[in-house]
Image (cartoon, grey):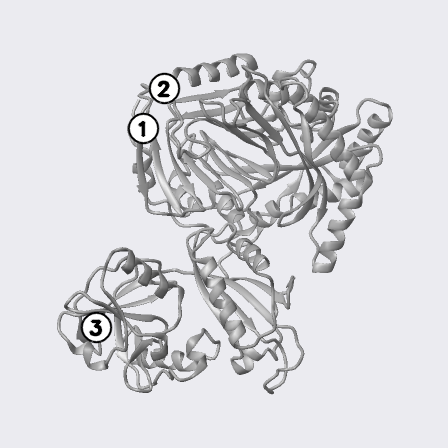
Amino acid sequence: MTLTRIPLVWRDPVAAFSSLKDQPFALLMHGAQKRWSYICANPVETLFTTPANAQDALDHMGNVSRDVAFERVGDAPPFCGGWAGMLSYEFGKTLLPRLEMGPERGAWPDLALGFYQEFIVFDHVKGRAEYWNWNWCYPAAATVSLLEVMARDGGTTFGAPLSRAPPKPQTARPDYEARIARTVKYVHAGDCFQSNISQRFDFELADGAHPYDLTRRLAQSSVAPFSAFLRLPGLALASNSPERFLKVRPDGEGRLKVSTKPIKGTRPRGKTPQEDAALAAELEASEKDRAENLMIVDLMRNDLSRVSIPGTVKVPRLHALESYANVHHLVSTVEAVLQPGKGPLDLIAAAFPGGSVTGAPKIRAMQIIAELEDDARGPYCGSLVWMTPDGWMDSSILIRSTALEQTPDGQWLGHYRSGGGIVADSVPADEYQETLDKALAMSHALTCPAHGQPRDVVFIGANRSHESVVNSRDRSFLLGDGCFETLRSVGEMIEGVDEHLRLLEESRRALAIAVGPETSALRKALNDLVCGLEGEHAIRITMSRGAGGRGADGGAADPVTVLSATPLHDGRPYPALTLATSTIRRNETSPLSRLKSTSYGDNLAARRQANAAGAHEALMLNMHGRVACLAMANVFLLTAQGVWVTPPEEEGARPGYMRGCVLKTLEERGMTVEIRPIEADELNATDISLFGTNSLWGMRPVKTIDSRPLKERLSLF
């Protein structure tokens, strides 16, 4: 066994997976604000079974894992090869007794798992991507590597609504509410404490739409912590699950620690901050929802105790509030330590399917589900799972997930389900509405056009606003009385957040704008803004004094902070620049030259002047006729002697993030750097090179100044 590792140029994993969208057993695992994403393909072994013999399948998985030469390296990500894929809800029926009755299985297998020796891991914290291949040398290994497939064109995204018509519930509301009422009677009769009843929504993809477009759409609008896409022969699964099922990690003492996070209790998000907070408070105070959550916690404690060391089952978090794009949830955490000799497969046998999607007691709750639901659940309420040969595992419960089947003529038909836990005091009408609230993100993703417009987040004072409208009397709009920072994001990774926020704070203080949102709130808003984005975006933070009159103090209005994300259709590396020297001067004596003020009409006019002259960008001189900057960037000069020169801030240079990055890189590489005034005549010397630097471009070479060619050199980045 030889481990091959190849560093790759960073790409957003959702965009990178596109070329694999039709390759059987290709798998994408990603999620909101998670450090790691994975792309897996070309499994050396597969399980695709219906109906499954549960114990035989689990034994086979264990044997395959034990037969490979695997030793985790020190810097390995959590998933670093092994089994990954789907366990359907019906697989759980093969693990438990007295569950033979119920709807017939559909097109979905009980098990669809691959054993992966090659994959790509994405580290969102460090902005790194890396290809791994263990080269276990199975005879079934693919002849075309994952890297070769990834290099293919994945095609364009689908901009129109994905479904031909809005998803249609397969159960009429009166019928569904009658089933809820029937479940309540079972609870009152003592059959169960809780049973999870769901309804199904069907749709048909529009011509030209692909199942993977749904994953893209969800990533843009409401990506969840356990999002995934799995392609199978004639089938596709798009999951947007918020719920962890089982996680296994070493505990530092040679034992395996397991945790699970059952979700029970739901409220929709509010339309205003006040309504949203009220709904969250209502959920936290709800005795019904807390009781519902506690029942599942007790069930999971019982399941885990079957394979755990006595006394190690704990509940460190009970009824914690977690908020997502469309709903608030109550989420608890249950932990335990596995018995010696027990591992992930034993844990699955003891606890699958998850109690939060069955009810309690589990077997009777599942019998009621089989009686009242018309179709086999398939992936819904099953699990998306991965496990490594050394016993690490993570898994989600497949709620907020869509199953799609391809017809012989190539058309895609899909369905998803939405349900809730029914208890003694459940109200059928309320439970029906809850299924609609939970399905809202999936419905929007299918019926709304692709999100191609800029995103915005607004703060009024220190508080985040649900309205994206700025007062027409805002002083930044009227008078340029504000400041800003421009950042670059690649997928969900934003470059230089700390430094940009520091520069913004300096600008705010220089303009004496009252304190706005806390830094932590800005960070959270930035994370929300880029959640699910694909490709490169310009992220801008603009802070204004707020609405007011024309006086120096501006009145007593709260400051307004706007965060926006705009797609960058042309990303790095940008082509070399052509410059035209502007007649508009940069006033280096103004205090506004030392910060990024929203009063930058001179810079815009200079760029328009350059564009009219046929150039990309304007070279701006200061009031003394020396080089200051470009209209939208700082300047670095490389002399014929190999000295790097940039003007000081006193000459009109901006204190920008990228300028600092370039200076630091030059220093680290031992290059000669001078921060000094640059006379305009120095640009006439032979063998010089010039670069424009800003957060969006990086370091962009200059090809010509006023049609005179310069010596082009590669940038540092």
Q: Nearer the viewer, mark 2 or mark 3?
A: 2
| In-front residue for pair 81/254 | 254
Instruction: For the N terminus, give its image quadrant.
Output: top left
Secondary structure under the numbered disc 1 in the rendered image = loop
Instruction: For the C terminus, give its image quadrant.
Output: bottom left
| In-front residue for pair 421/260 | 260
Tag 1 near tag 2, CB within 8 Å: no
Residue drawn at point x = 53 percent, y = 72 percent: 508
Looking at the picture, which amino acid does disc 2 mark? Ala
Secondary structure under the numbered disc 3 in the rendered image = strand
Tag 2 near tag 3, CB within 8 Å: no
Q: Position of residue 23 (x, y in %)?
A: 39, 33
Residue drawn at point x = 19 percent, y = 81 percent: 681
For residue 182, what is the image quadrant?
Answer: top right
* Residue 374 in view of the camera: no
What residue is pinned by disc 2? Answer: 69
The mark nearer the N terminus, 1 or 3, is 1
The numbered dot on residue 704 is 3
167 to the left or right of 122: right
| Few, some or many residues within 10 Å of mark 2 (<14, 14–19, 20+) | few
Q: Position of residue 699 (x, y in %)?
A: 30, 62
The numbered dot on residue 3 is 1
Marks 1 and 3 sit apart, C-alpha to C-alpha, by 47 Å
Looking at the picture, which amino acid does disc 1 mark? Leu
Residue drawn at point x = 53 percent, y = 24 percent: 253
549 to the left or right of 596: right
Secondary structure under the numbered disc 2 in the rendered image = loop
